Image: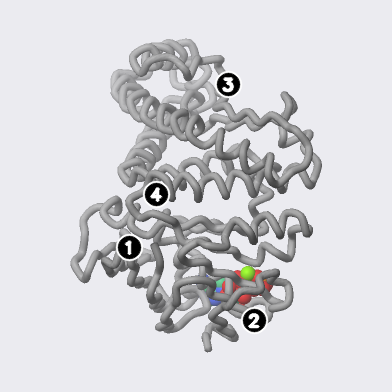
């Protein structure tokens, strides 16, 4: 698939932008802080309804209360117009071909993209949140209904935590409503855990294959969801439900003492190991980058394989500046041949691509 045009209003440092994009490679270059990342982030936002950098509120131009992103996308010669309105003080709104759609899931899965950026190293090095988000953002693009599952889970979690907090330290508190929140939490937990489990199963062979191609060393990669209670995630949905229920019961007092939900996929680790050693702590810088790239490339391959959109838009945000020659070459050869590739760079010469490119220069939120 590809993006034919992008319009922005009050999006970060863009007052207003109307830009035509081309199939093939589009290169955006310009000095630091001019709006290169902002531009590609806006496209990526339409794929996951989240930014790879910061909370959604920061996307609205600092002196405004609403930001809009409009795109015309093309997939199998069929064009669609997507609209996203990000509001500071109200719910976000979405439109498809000019008609407001009720559910965010109606515009998800239409514009698929994979963004490579210098922050990708955090996937390996930083806290579990980054790895959970990686899986979540991919699953959202493959199965848009998953977005609602995550939203519902967040809501249940917040309400359950409020209840636990209000009960903290109070004797004889009425826990009857807590049972209802337990049920909701467990049902949504099972959905999230199984979705992530299925996704890991599909991704792992692709990740291993890409890692083997990028890296000369032989490293066996394993990826597993890990919870703090030794709950077996490989069991059937019914058994998983029972295990979660039992664990919640044994943790009841602990949760009441601490006033937070301790059981559930919001606290899970997505453990990545190389030859049995945790990548977060043991992988070398080169190994960590090879892994990070393999995860991203594998997600692009999976989207190409299973999504109706075919190939996702490949976004390379300033990533060549942080890669060494081996990994630059691997990434370059991977993206070559994709229907549309968007690349940003502060220095044009940093982009190791020889083939023809459509070039745009960005300065102060203006594109030429
Ligand atoms: N909500 C906002 N409102 C107004 N300006 C913003 C907002 N968010 C970010 N900016 C500004 O947008 C500018 C451009 O940011 P961007 O990250 O796109 O730069 P860049 O061209 O990618 O730079 P670099 O080469 O350093 O990566 C920054 O100067 C930043 O202050
Ligand atoms: Mg940038």
Q: Nearer the viewer, residue 300 or 149?
A: 300
Q: Which residue is mark 3?
A: 228
Looking at the image, is mark 4 or mark 1 nearer the viewer? 1
The answer to which image quadrant residue 210 occupies is: top right
Sequence-wise first label, 3 or 4: 4
- Mark number for residue 141? 4
Q: Badges 2 and 3: C-beta atoms under 8 Å apart?
A: no
Disc number at residue 75?
1
Q: Residue furthest bottom?
A: 368
Where residue 243 appears, as percent x and y from the top left, is 43, 12
Query: Which is in the foreground here, disc 3 or disc 4?
Result: 4
Residue 213, compared with residue 245, is above or below; it is below
**Residue under label 2:** 30
**Residue at image x 53%, y 39%?**
132
Q: Residues within 10 Å of mark 1 (few under 14, many from 20)?
A: some
Where disc 2 sits, the SS reads loop
- Percent across and percent down for residue 336 are 57, 63
Ligand 1: does it lie within 8 Å of the C-beta at label 2?
A: yes
Point out the frontmost of discs 1 and 2: 1
Q: Is residue 133 left or right of residue 218?
A: left
């Amino acid at each position: 698939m590809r993006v034919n045009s992008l319009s922005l209003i009050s999006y970060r440092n863009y007052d207003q932008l109307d830009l035509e994009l081309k199939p093939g490679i589009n290169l955006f270059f310009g000095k630091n802080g001019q709006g290169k990342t902002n531009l590609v982030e806006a496209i990526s936002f339409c794929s996951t309804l989240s930014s790879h950098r910061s909370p959604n509120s920061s996307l609205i131009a600092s002196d405004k209360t609403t930001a809009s992103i409009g795109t015309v996308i093309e997939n199998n010669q069929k064009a669609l117009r997507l609209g996203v309105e990000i509001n500071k003080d109200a719910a976000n709104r979405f439109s498809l071909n000019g008609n407001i759609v009720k559910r965010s899931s109606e515009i998800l899965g239409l514009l698929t993209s994979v963004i490579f950026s210098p922050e990708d190293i955090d996937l390996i090095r930083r806290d579990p949140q980054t790895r959970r988000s990686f899986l979540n953002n991919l699953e959202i693009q493959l199965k848009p209904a998953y977005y609602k599952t995550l939203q519902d889970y967040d809501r249940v979690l917040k309400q359950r935590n409020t209840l636990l907090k209000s009960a903290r330290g109070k004797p004889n508190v009425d826990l009857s409503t807590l049972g209802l929140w337990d049920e909701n939490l467990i049902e949504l937990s099972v959905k999230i855990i199984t979705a992530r489990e299925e996704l890991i199963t599909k991704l792992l062979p692709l990740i291993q294959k890409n890692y083997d191609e990028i890296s000369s060393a032989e490293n066996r990669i394993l990826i597993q969801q890990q919870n703090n209670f030794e709950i077996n995630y490989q069991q059937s949905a019914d058994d998983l439900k029972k295990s979660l229920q039992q664990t919640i019961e044994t943790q009841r007092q602990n949760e009441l003492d601490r006033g937070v939900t301790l059981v559930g996929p919001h606290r899970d680790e997505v453990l990545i190991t190389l030859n049995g050693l945790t990548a977060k702590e043991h992988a070398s810088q080169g190994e960590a980058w090879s892994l990070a790239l393999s995860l991203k490339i594998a997600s692009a391959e999976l989207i190409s394989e299973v999504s109706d959109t075919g190939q996702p838009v490949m976004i390379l945000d300033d990533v060549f500046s942080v890669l060494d020659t081996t990994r630059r070459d691997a990434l370059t050869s991977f993206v070559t041949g994709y229907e549309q590739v968007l690349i940003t760079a502060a220095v044009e010469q940093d982009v190791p691509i020889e083939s023809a490119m459509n070039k745009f220069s960005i300065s102060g939120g203006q594109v030429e």
